[in-house]
Image (cartoon, rainbow, N blue to C red):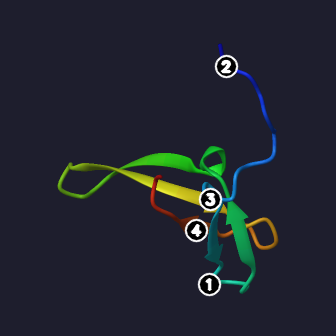
Amino acid sequence: MVTVVSTVPHPSVIKEVVCRHCGSTLNYVPKDIQERKTVDYDGSRDIVYFINCPPCGTEISVKRY
């Protein structure tokens, strides 16, 4: 059975990135990552993982955990 020890994310899963548009330093966890499927001009498909910068709204590309 699963029991909840803490609802605060463990430091090992918190990642940090700097927004290149506004310079804000952002912390994020896996549940914050969004994905979008894209199609290239040659028909190949890719999945782009990103987070949104809260201050400026810019999409920041990140790697999936």
Q: Residue 48's x, y, as percent?
A: 43, 55
Residue at the image position 48 percent from the left and 47 percent from the top:
36
Report which residue position mark 4 lands on: 60
Gap between marks 1 and 3, in whole Å? 13 Å
Label 4: which secondary element: strand
Contact flag, marks 4 and 1 (Cβ < 8 Å): yes
Report which residue position mark 1 lands on: 20
Q: Which mark is residue 30?
A: none
Please, is residue 34 above or below residue 7 in the view?
Answer: below
Residue at the image position 62 percent from the left and 59 percent from the top:
51
Q: What's the residue type where badge 3 is placed?
A: Ile
Q: What's the residue type where badge 1 is placed?
A: Arg
Q: Residue 22's x, y, as percent?
A: 73, 84
Contact flag, marks 1 and 2 (Cβ < 8 Å): no
Label 3: which secondary element: strand
Q: Is residue 34 left or right of residue 36?
A: right
Dividing the image into 4 quarters, which one contains the N terminus?
Answer: top right
Q: What's the residue type where badge 2 is placed?
A: Val
Q: What's the residue type where badge 4 is placed?
A: Ile
Gap between marks 4 and 1, in whole Å? 8 Å
Report which residue position mark 2 lands on: 2
Gap between marks 2 and 4, in whole Å? 33 Å
Task: Mark 1: give few (<14), some (14-19) or many (20+) Cα within 10 Å.
Answer: few
Residue at the image position 73 percent from the left and 49 percent from the top:
9
Give the foreground label among 3 and 2. Answer: 2
Answer with mark 3 or mark 2, whichever residue precedes in sequence. 2
Answer with mark 4 or mark 3, whichever residue precedes in sequence. 3
Contact flag, marks 3 and 2 (Cβ < 8 Å): no
Please, is residue 32 above or below residue 23 in the view?
Answer: above
Q: Residue 7's x, y, as percent?
A: 81, 39
Gap between marks 4 and 3, in whole Å? 5 Å
Give the foreground label among 2 and 4. Answer: 2
